[in-house]
Image: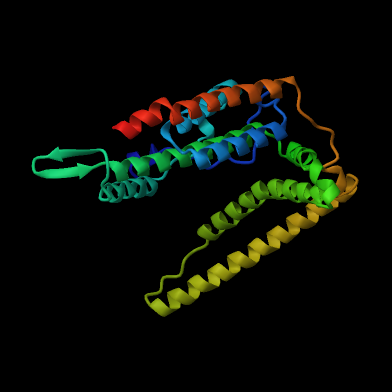
Amino acid sequence: MTAAAKQRKPRRQVVLLRPVPGRTAIHELWAGSKLLIVAGIGVLLTFYPGWVPIGAVALLVVVAAKIARIPRGVLPTIPAWLWGLLLLGAVTATFAGGSPEFGVGSVTVGLGGLLNFLRITALSIVLLGLGAMVSWTTNVAEVAPAVAKLGRPLRPLRVPVDDWAVTLALALRAFPMLIDEFSTLYAARRLRPHDVDGDRRARGRRLASDLIDLLSAAITVALRRADEMGDAITARGGAGQISAVPSGPKRRDGVAFAIVTLVCGIALALELTILGTSGIRS
């Protein structure tokens, strides 16, 4: 093993659905308030995906991460192939041309396609960061009561809001456990010795057999985890207790709503008036 391989840092994995420890103002917000804020910002960026709204939401995410004291270690390592795909997408989008344009000798190059690609990429990163912030600052146990409270107006219509909330809570709880189990199975599979065989058909049969073994083991692990979770829920009083925990907004939630509304309102006004008009004229 070379010295460069020894000094290579381990790749950081994605940390989702696991809150970062802390008792900051962002952590103390009601889970329903975070869901409503994310939904509102999603609607804003759906209808007005301009640079100003994207920048405003990115600023909110960065400030919220500073307040919540989110460490850099929770950010995953970006693989090299993803950078290559982004570079390939940028080069391909540049061929679309469009305004603005500039001349290089006798050739006119349009940057409209590249700017659109960069805007869509920035929008995707901001939305991922927004969802990650909710994941890093919200306990999974707080989601079901918040969803049940937000869906209370739908109960007169016989909508099973409590069942939906319980299903969502169980899915969020099971997702990290299953990821750990699948990672363990994959690591154990990689430790098994590989048979050296030059026949392509034999390698294909062996690959299919290994895939079937992994799927069978994954299904078995998922069923075992589901059985254990069912026993734990029954011992604690049934599934109805998951969404019956009292929860609701407080004064800090109103302050958060006011700040987000103010920042998004200013960004939308700038996008529709000053910056939008200057963009049309140019």
User: Which of 251/258 is in front?
Assistant: 258
Classify residue 195 as left or right of residue 28: left
Residue at x 39% of width, y 77% of height? 200
Q: Position of residue 115 (x, y in %)?
A: 33, 40
Task: Tell which of 122 and 201 is nearer to you.
Answer: 122
Q: Is residue 69 visible?
A: no
On screen, residue 70 versus residue 141, left or right, reads left
**131 versus 178 height, above or below:** above
The C terminus: image quadrant: top left
Residue 227 in sight from this viewpoint = yes
Residue visible at 56% across and 35% down?
130
Q: How is the image coloured?
A: rainbow
Report the residue at 88% width, 44% height from top.
236
Q: Quadrant of residue 5?
A: top left
Q: Is residue 109 left or right of residue 84?
A: left
Give the number of marks: 0
Query: In the drawing, does residue 146 fall left or right of residue 116?
Result: right
Q: Position of residue 139 (x, y in %)?
A: 71, 35
The picture places residue 127, in percent across and down from the top left corner, at 52, 39
Q: Quadrant of residue 271?
A: top left
Residue 225 x %, y %: 74, 55
- Depth order, front residue of 201/13: 13
Asked if residue 77 is positioned above or below residue 183 in the image, the reply reads above
Residue drawn where x is 62% and y is 39% of the image: 39
Q: Residue furthest left?
A: 105
